[in-house]
Image (cartoon, rainbow, N blue to C red):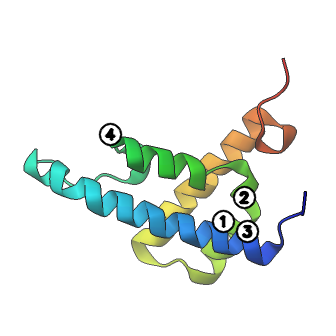
Amino acid sequence: MKKESDTEKSYRVLLLWLDLNKAIAQARPADLNQGLSMHPPWTSGNANVQETWRRLTDPENLLALEQWLYQSADGQTADWAFKALEVCRERKRKTGNGGRPAPP
């Protein structure tokens, strides 16, 4: 299996951010109809937002998230990127083993 380059990892994280924005935009009308304000992705009750957040914070994205944050993020996106890094680091700490669950 070919090892993913740093550039490919960065593109993957960028695409995940775009997917997250789409998921939030699609979930938002339903939230507004229920009188809810837009929630940050880590507190969203929307399954698509939750799944995209889970994929973004996969420990394999740690380095690319760090690079993206320090090169590109600003404002609310930076706040969310910091939270994504926090979650990603915690997931990596819990699983050890490069983000994959530890063997039984």
Which residue is denoted by mark 1 in the rendering? 65
Left or right: 61, with 37 as reference point: right
Q: Are marks 2 and 1 in contact (CB under 8 Å)?
A: yes
Rendered residue at 40%/50% (across/down): 49
User: Badge 1 local density, few (<14 within 10 Å), some, or many (20+)?
Assistant: many
Q: Quadrant of residue 81?
A: bottom right
Residue 38 in view in this figure: no
The Cα–Cα distance between marks 2 and 3, rounded to whole angstroms, is 10 Å
Which residue is denoted by mark 2 in the rendering? 62
The Cα–Cα distance between marks 1 and 3, rounded to whole angstroms, is 9 Å
Which residue is denoted by mark 4 in the rendering? 45
Kind of residue at badge 1:
Leu
Which residue is denoted by mark 3 in the rendering? 9
Kind of residue at badge 3:
Lys
Q: Are marks 1 and 3 in contact (CB under 8 Å)?
A: no
Of discs 2 and 3, which sits in the foreground? 3
Q: Is residue 91 placed above or below 78 in the rendered structure?
A: above
